[in-house]
Amino acid sequence: MANLKEMAKGKELFTGGHRACAGCGAVMIARQVLMAAGPNTVVANATGCLEVVSTIFPFTSWNVPFVHSAFENAGATISGVEALYKSWMRQGKYNKKLNFIAFGGDGGTYDIGLQSLSGALERGHNILYVCYNNEAYMNTGVQRSGATPKGADTTTAPVGKVKKGKEQYRKDLTAIVIAHKVPYVAQSVAGNWRDLTSKVEKALSMEGPKFINVFQPCRLGWSYEPELTCEMGRMAADTCSWPLYEVVNGQYRITYKPKEKKPVSEWIKLQGRFRHLLKPENKPLLDDIQAAVDQQWQDLLKKENQNLRENPVKTA
Amino acid sequence: MAKQKIVARTGNEAMAEAMRQVNPDVVAAYPITPATEVVQIFAGYVADGVVDTEFVPVESEHSAMSACIGASAAGGRAMTGTSSQGLALMAEMLYIAGGLRLPIVLADVNRALSSPINIHCDHSDTMMVRDAGWIQIFSENSQEGYDNMIQAIRIAEKSKLPVVVTTDGFIISHGMERIEILDDQDVKDFIGVYKPEHYLLDLDHPITVGALDLTDYYFEHKRQAIEGMKQASSIILDVAKDFKDKAGRSYGLFENYKMDDAERAIVAMGSTAGTAKVVVDNLRAKGQKVGLLKPRVFRPFPKEEMAEALKGLKAIAVMDRSDSMNAHEGPLCLEVKAGLFDASTSLSIDPEQSRRIDKGLNKPVLNYIYGLGGREVKLEDIESIYNDLASAVKGKAMPKVVYQGVRE
């Protein structure tokens, strides 16, 4: 795996000058994914923050070929690009080895683009789909999505006199992708560059559909100080709110186990979207959230242990 | 002229045959009645290895067009086929393909749009997306479906606009006809090699496709596409000329059938034009001066040319196989009438007479909405329209829009 120094020497494939907010995690993810992928990469992007801030005509931040067409179809669009590549390779019209990477936010991936993603995974295209998951529709102004966690304050599930933010737990999209039995599925986080870039490198070394769900703190939607983005991501992993793990050919491996699993409230209290949860009357809700995080972590440990018992070699 | 093989083919088989000969790099498609066979037959070619195409059996028509956009932007020839609800689901992506100026070719087998759900022919699906920035070419029969598909490749690539070629659901798509097909090599020579100027897989020249275009550029880019559509008319005619040299069959923006001395004419598209030709022959045999104008290209709409072709007539009936929900009339009639109006009036520099009207072009234009949901249109239905026109010529007041063949 390339170290940071080596990667930093490469050409910037996602350049500055874009219009992202200060402290944006999405552009950090795009830049690091491309640092790991290298220049022989074609990118498809769903409509959303990343596309909007990076391609305002006549400017572009992308030093690799890039295509955006609509919101719900990054999976299908990259499928088409990859299909053309396969066709040309078969016809002897092309000979470079290429990576095909799709980027979509959680809205474009968990919700409106889920069908397109599922189709692409099932058809077995040689692609990597990266979801930059900031847990709401940030581009349109912080509306709830299927990725928004329980209790979060958003503009379409706001905290009011009777409601306490989103009432449902988020959907486990990573598990849905794992159910497609694709070769590589992982969760990573903005703020842990080594975890993200090594997962991208590993994914791209494998044939077939790959998926990485990258947790992306959003200072605007989550309401915290912009310089805290990386810290916010790391704390999500330290509290096990967002476990970092990978599933390689069905084998679970947790890639980061915090030495001391911190209480979720440590992380929650730094974010405006959860401010109301710190009120004494909302303690039962906060306890529920902690219990769900604990359960999710236990389930994951169990899956990893089971894999280790059954197949110690493969996950070593 | 090239040697051709005479075969029996349904419309769907003819279009699939054309696609095999075109041998596109990518086909992405989803099944829908009555267009399913087009891609089903094509999938057979892929399975037998007789084409180089990468076939992407997507999970929806929206993804079909999205994958075609990806493949076309990447630098290849991309094709698909669909119908009705499939075209409707694609609508968002059709506009995007048009706006991105990608030369995708789509075979649409015309079928009524829901609701109520129906699987039979009308033109409401194509009309729904008539302003999407796609060239629209209608076919009268299987032969035209085949010929138009082959010409569409060159039209799309030269004009940098996507093309939809239509046939009438079941009437053409499932009707077996005698057609003539070119040799594979002749089709290959005719369409040539596609060389895109800018494409994604050109790694040495990375491009950004689908950038965000705000108030400062969007209008200019749309204006260019509109100009591209206008210029496409001459490209369509150039390609038709080459096609005539190759295959011997003539195509224009529309077809004039016995129009030279006609006093009354029907304007009708698709398979109905074939039925109307029989009626014209029958009435001509009785000494009546009737004709038919069959639009082939609905976008770009040949306004001036059509007005010119219709100018000597005393009365015109336009048959629309779709409705505009209480706009003035059906979509085809709106276009024909607007063309005639523009041709009949001209702005003058004479302030006394700021708008001059040419009464010779001002004539009764009746609209017949027919055949919705596959309702049959018979010879006598069309004959009755010519009779209505005769009444109009005599000065009888006629209804502006008639819903023909419906129980009311």
Image (tube, grey):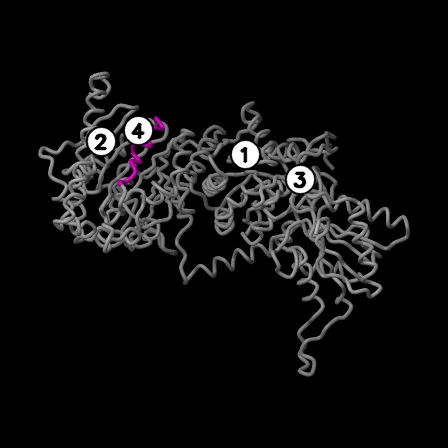
Checking the image for residue B145, the label placed there is 3
According to the picture, the residue beneath numbered tag 4 turns out to be A184
Of B306 and B363, the residue lying toward us:
B363
Percent from the top left, x then y, of residue B48?
56, 23
- The type of residue carrying mark 2 is Tyr
Chain for disc number 2: A
Chain for disc number 4: A
- Mark 3–mark 4 distance (CA, rounded to whole Å): 45 Å
- Mark 2–mark 4 distance (CA, rounded to whole Å): 11 Å
Are there few (<14), some (14-19), or many (20+) residues within 10 Å of tag 3?
Answer: many
According to the picture, the residue beneath numbered tag 1 turns out to be B31
Query: Which of disc 4 and disc 2 is earlier in sequence?
Result: 4
> Picture quarter containing residue A200?
top left
Of A55 and B204, the residue lying toward us:
A55
According to the picture, the residue beneath numbered tag 2 turns out to be A245
Callout 2 and callout 4 share a chain: yes
Checking the image for residue B327, the label placed there is none
Chain for disc number 1: B
Q: Determine the secondary structure under disc 2.
A: strand
Q: Which residues are magenta?
A: A169-181
Percent from the top left, x then y, of residue B310?
76, 59
Q: Is residue B299 above or below residue A111?
A: below
Q: Quadrant of the N terminus of chain A?
A: top left
Q: Going 53% across and 55% down the picture, which residue do you hit? A: B225
